[in-house]
Image (spheres, rainbow, N blue to C red):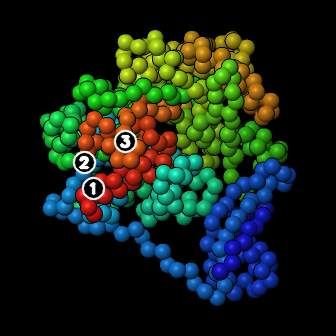
């Protein structure tokens, strides 16, 4: 086997046959001598003109690569040790699959609905402007990630095996490209089917998934968890409970506070979604008048310090859509997603300002929920500014910079619609002032970024959990409650699908070690 690093034209990189020809030429061998290629890394180098694709690939000559088997899961029944998982998002699903690898029966309790039923509730949000508090863009099978497009890039390499997380996805139907692309992405059109396949594996191997089951109490025996009680009166019993609710489970955070289980206010970031024509972002990033058709829609990443706070792009969606991500009536929250081809005419990204605990002090009466109360207040303000439905408050970037209300608004991907307002009336002053400063800098870094049809849509407020649920660094258990494992984004220990999945696996591995499996 040989490992080669190639720099290819976009056309060459788009064709396996052309890649084979380049490999053969570089090794000075006939193409038919190459049995297989196994790509290790693929990224775009847009620093020079023309743009090149960097590809690192393993070349198998006169030998066949070893066949890779799917991950094996044990079949369990009611006699097996059991663990409860609250939440069926990435952390919860990966925890369940890891438990099955060890022969432990996972019992997932999910407040929302299965993917197929959940789609109808999302349609109602977009068309009828009705939000189901248990089934929306954040809650239901697969969690928030299912309908926020499956970005799989993470820097959290120390928390577990990224390669294994990606393999679980490909074992359940994801394209193998996610295993070697620099910024892997599945797409909202494909991810629901993959999530369903993962949960079918869990059930087929003896695990349980209870949908439409909102947990409203932890069952405790002094300092030991014994199970959970749901809103419908049903109970599930186990000595190990993984709390993997996601960053928007405000009722769970309130429940923990009510039961006297320690939580902490945690900083997060707040701002808006910024939307541009994708064609503009391609011109800026690829330094061209017309994008090469073999290049993917371009993305970007921006960060700037303004008056001591970080302002940064977040969850950038090439060819994407701005989506309504509220989890309760009376609030407006926006998020973004892209289909697998990223072929929409708009690009959008969160553009947010880092907050800290002193910003939440006006809500100090809410104790450890003060960050959550601050977050909810801004979302409710956005709801009223939009007209008391899911219409979102919006402003052209150029008008926002000049502090004037936009006379007209450009087209947008946000289906419920937008209303021209002054975003200074929606955002806290500490956020709007820093957004202005950063957008002026970004407009110089990316010419045209802050002009023309650049649009701000509010509010992007669910960047991460507003609380942290403490846990021991080694045991991963809550310091007060034995057998309770705060996990993933909702507990403050992850920031995306891959890091949440790895955290779920870590909690499952800890349980397996205690059970002796």
Left or right placement of residue 65 versus residue 203 in this view: right
Label 3 packing within 10 angstroms: few (<14), some (14-19), many (20+): few
Q: Identify the residue under disc 3.
A: 472
Q: Real-space Cα distance between discs 2 and 1?
A: 10 Å
* Figure check: 73 above or below 282: below
Q: State the image coordinates of residue 458 (x, y, percent, origin top left).
A: 55, 24
Label 1 packing within 10 angstroms: few (<14), some (14-19), many (20+): few
Q: Real-space Cα distance between discs 3 and 1?
A: 15 Å
Q: Real-space Cα distance between discs 3 and 2?
A: 15 Å
* Figure check: 315 above or below 53: above
Q: Identify the residue under disc 2.
A: 240
Tell me which residue sits at (78%, 64%) in the image: 7
Left or right placement of residue 453 versus residue 130 in this view: right
Left or right placement of residue 374 versus residue 347 in this view: left
Q: Identify the residue under disc 1.
A: 514
Q: Secondary structure at mark 1?
A: helix
Q: State the image coordinates of residue 206 (x, y, percent, origin top left).
A: 23, 61
Tell me which residue sits at (28%, 35%) in the image: 480
- Nearest the viewer among 451 and 108 is 108
Q: State the image coordinates of residue 406 (x, y, percent, origin top left).
A: 67, 16
In terms of image quadrants, where is residue 5?
Answer: bottom right
**Can you see residue 125?**
no
Q: Tell me which label, 2 or 1, sits earlier in the chain.
A: 2
Q: Tell me which label, 3 or 2, sits earlier in the chain.
A: 2
């Amino acid at each position: 086997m040989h490992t080669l690093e190639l720099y290819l034209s976009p056309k060459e990189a788009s064709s396996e046959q052309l890649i084979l020809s380049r490999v053969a030429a570089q090794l000075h061998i006939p193409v038919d001598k190459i049995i297989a290629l196994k790509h290790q890394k693929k990224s775009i180098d847009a620093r020079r003109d023309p743009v090149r694709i960097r590809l690192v690939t393993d070349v198998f000559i006169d030998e066949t690569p070893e066949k890779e088997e799917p991950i094996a899961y044990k079949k369990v029944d009611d006699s097996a040790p059991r663990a409860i998982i609250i939440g069926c998002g990435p952390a919860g699903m990966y925890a369940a699959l890891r438990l099955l690898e060890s022969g432990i029966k996972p019992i997932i309790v999910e407040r929302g609905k299965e993917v197929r039923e959940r789609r109808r509730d999302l349609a109602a949000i977009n068309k009828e402007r009705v939000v189901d508090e248990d089934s929306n863009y954040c809650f239901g099978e697969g969690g928030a990630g299912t309908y926020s497009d499956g970005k799989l890039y993470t820097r959290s390499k120390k928390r577990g095996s990224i390669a294994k997380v990606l393999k679980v996805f490909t074992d359940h139907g994801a394209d193998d490209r996610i295993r070697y692309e620099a910024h892997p992405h599945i797409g909202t059109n494909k991810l629901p089917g993959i999530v369903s396949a993962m949960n079918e594996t869990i059930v087929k191997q003896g695990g349980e998934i209870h949908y439409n089951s909102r947990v409203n109490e932890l069952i405790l025996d002094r300092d030991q968890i014994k199970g959970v009680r749901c809103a419908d009166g049903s109970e599930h019993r186990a000595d190990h409970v993984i709390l993997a609710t996601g960053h928007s489970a405000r009722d769970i955070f309130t429940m923990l506070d009510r039961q006297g289980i320690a939580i902490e206010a945690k900083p997060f970031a707040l701002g808006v979604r910024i939307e541009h024509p994708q064609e503009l972002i391609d011109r800026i990033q690829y330094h061209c008048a017309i994008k090469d058709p073999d290049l993917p829609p371009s993305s970007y990443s921006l960060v700037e310090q303004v008056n001591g706070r970080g302002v940064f792009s977040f969850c950038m969606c090439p060819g994407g859509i701005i989506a309504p991500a509220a989890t309760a009536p009376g609030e407006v929250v926006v998020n973004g997603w892209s289909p697998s081809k990223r072929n929409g005419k708009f690009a959008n990204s969160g553009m947010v300002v880092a907050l800290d605990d002193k910003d939440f002090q006006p809500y100090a009466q809410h104790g450890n929920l003060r960050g959550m109360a601050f977050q909810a207040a801004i979302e409710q303000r956005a709801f009223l500014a939009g007209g008391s439905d899911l219409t979102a408050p919006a402003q052209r970037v150029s008008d926002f910079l000049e502090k004037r209300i936009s006379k007209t608004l450009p087209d947008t991907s946000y289906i419920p619609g937008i209303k021209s307002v002054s975003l200074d009336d929606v955002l806290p002053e500490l956020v709007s002032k820093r957004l202005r400063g950063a957008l002026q800098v970004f407009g110089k870094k990316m010419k045209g970024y802050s002009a023309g049809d650049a649009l701000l849509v509010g509010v992007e407020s669910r960047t991460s959990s507003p609380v942290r649920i403490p846990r021991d660094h080694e045991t991963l258990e809550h310091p007060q409650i034995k057998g309770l494992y705060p996990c993933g984004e909702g507990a403050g220990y992850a920031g995306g699908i891959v890091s949440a999945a790895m955290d779920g696996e870590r909690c499952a591995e800890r349980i397996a070690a205690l059970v002796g499996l």
